[in-house]
């Protein structure tokens, strides 16, 4: 999860993914048993005209270039010109998408035709004798002022040829088979309200437009809170997605071990390549794009705790350029928790409510910290222990020392570097071994925590 989902807020800690086959584009797309464009009528099968691959490539490349140009120039007529008029619902959705896009500024927006098409026999009855093709595409875009490098999104489009022209007929026929984050920007599924502050770009649900200004102010304040802890090494610009679309969030939880049920929000790293789709890896910028995505299952725009929630997630954005492959997971999440609650007085935080198991572990004299496997097992305890550990480090060496400790993991290149790197960092910054630190953490936990009787 660290490579894609950098971190997330855990809600239980305190109260306060049709068959589809890829075929090379070089093949002439004959629509018969292979399934592209065949429709079976009661009297006789009706077959689509075979598609010439070279002709399709040229036409689709030009169509996608016009579509990209329409976005960059905000030309609604050009956007509409390549849409198939036979599906009124699709046309309405495309109008809604364009309504959102014209509210944004893009440094770039382009489509990459991957050279592979898909065959989905189940779609034959919809298109009948009309030739149609489903090309795999990567959309690359960069939000002006927020994305220091482009972001790639996988899509499978449906293009149909009508009256000698190729038109875009659908963009979501097989979305369920896309990789994580494929065709999953907030404007792809619903109407959005977009607000911009000093540090934040908020993409909210249209139904929450009346709360948009408050959400922007909250996001800006969260950025400023994080900046007080982590002032250097990041752009202090964030994109917050707070739309009431559970499916959008679930696109990031397609792995068996991933579960969004108790997650308040996630911070996701945005890449300019998609594994298994991109033809070559993209260079990684020093400060990669990212998104903070609020879980619609729990989102309430009036909740006072949104500030703490966003502070936690934006701390992940700030620390991202400093996170190494071997940065311990307890530290990644612990410092985000620390950022969220650092401005509270101790009497507001203590005693920290912990599970009986964590309290018993502390009383026994040592609290183990999860360098890996953080998001499985007793996850709530892992968050709490990581947070308390960061509090303890700050108590001993201050916030500058906490930042120094975190930064020591930046050069780690392998997950299994976490344990030796942690040992070295603790010795260098605190003069303690890992065992000694976990003992000190146990004492600190006993002093500052109590059992959550309602947990």
Image: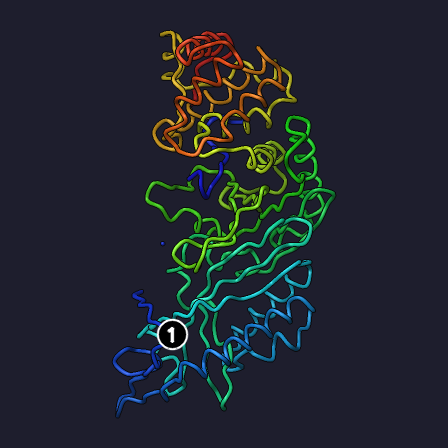
In the figure, residue 375 lies in which quadrant?
top left
Instruction: Please give the name of the residue rendered at 40% of the width and 33% of the height, measured from the top-left corner.
Output: 414
Q: Residue at x 47, y 22 (%)?
A: 386
Crowding around mark 1 (Cα neighbors within 10 Å: few <14, some 14 to 19, many 20+) is some
In which image quadrant can residue 424 be found?
top left
Image quarter hosting the C terminus: top left
State the image coordinates of residue 245 (x, y, percent, origin top left). 51, 53
In the displayed structure, 384 sits above or below 351; it is below
Residue 7 as seen in the image, left or right of residue 36: right
- Residue 394 lies, with reference to residue 24, above or below; the image says above
Q: Is residue 407 above or below residue 267?
A: above
Image quarter in which the N terminus is found: top left
Q: Along the horizontal axis of the image, is 332 left or right of 219? A: left
Q: How many marks?
A: 1
Of residues 333 and 320, the one nearer the viewer is: 320
Q: Write down the residue under mark 1.
A: 25
Mark 1: which secondary structure? loop
Q: Residue at point 40% right, 84% down?
A: 52
Q: Position of residue 163 (x, y in %)?
A: 50, 91
Residue 91 in picture, x, y percent from top left: 55, 74
């Amino acid at each position: 999860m660290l490579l894609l989902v950098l971190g997330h807020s855990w809600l239980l800690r305190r109260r306060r993914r049709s068959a589809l086959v890829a075929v090379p584009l070089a093949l002439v797309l004959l629509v018969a048993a292979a399934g592209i464009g065949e429709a079976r009528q009661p009297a006789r099968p009706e077959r689509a005209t075979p598609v010439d691959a070279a002709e399709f490539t040229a036409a689709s490349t030009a169509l996608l270039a016009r579509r990209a140009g329409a976005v960059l120039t905000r030309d609604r007529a050009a956007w509409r010109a390549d849409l198939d008029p036979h599906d009124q619902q699709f046309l309405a959705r495309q109008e809604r998408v364009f309504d959102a896009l014209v509210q944004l500024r893009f440094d770039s927006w382009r489509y990459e035709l991957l050279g592979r098409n898909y065959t989905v026999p189940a779609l034959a009855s919809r298109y009948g004798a009309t030739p149609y093709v489903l090309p795999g595409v990567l959309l690359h875009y960069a939000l002006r002022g927020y994305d220091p490098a482009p972001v790639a999104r996988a899509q499978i489009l449906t293009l149909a040829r009508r009256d000698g022209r190729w038109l875009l007929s659908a963009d979501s026929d097989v979305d369920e088979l896309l990789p994580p984050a494929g065709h999953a920007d907030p404007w792809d599924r619903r109407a959005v309200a977009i607000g911009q502050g000093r540090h934040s770009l908020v993409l909210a649900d249209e139904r929450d437009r009346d709360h948009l200004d408050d959400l922007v102010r909250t996001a800006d304040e969260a950025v400023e809170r994080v900046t007080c802890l982590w002032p250097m090494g990041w752009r202090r610009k964030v994109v917050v997605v707070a739309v009431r679309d559970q499916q959008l969030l679930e696109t990031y939880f397609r792995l068996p071990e991933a579960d969004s049920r108790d997650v308040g929000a996630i911070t996701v790293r945005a890449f300019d390549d998609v594994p298994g789709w991109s033809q070559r890896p993209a260079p990684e910028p020093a400060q990669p794009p990212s998104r903070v995505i609020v879980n619609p299952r729990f989102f309430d725009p009036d909740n006072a705790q949104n500030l703490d929630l966003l502070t936690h997630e934006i701390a992940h954005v700030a620390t991202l350029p400093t996170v190494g492959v071997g940065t311990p997971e307890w530290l990644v999440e612990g410092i985000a928790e620390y950022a969220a609650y650092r401005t509270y007085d101790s009497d507001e935080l203590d005693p920290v409510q912990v599970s009986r198991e964590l309290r018993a572990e502390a009383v026994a004299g040592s609290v183990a910290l999860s360098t890996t496997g953080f998001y499985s097992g007793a996850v709530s305890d892992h968050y709490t222990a990581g947070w308390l550990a960061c509090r303890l480090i700050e108590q001993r060496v201050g916030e500058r020392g906490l930042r120094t400790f975190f930064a020591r993991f930046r050069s780690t290149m392998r997950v299994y570097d976490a344990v030796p790197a942690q040992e070295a960092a603790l010795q260098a910054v605190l003069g303690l071994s890992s065992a000694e630190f976990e003992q000190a953490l146990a004492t600190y936990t006993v002093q500052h925590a109590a059992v959550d009787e309602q947990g």
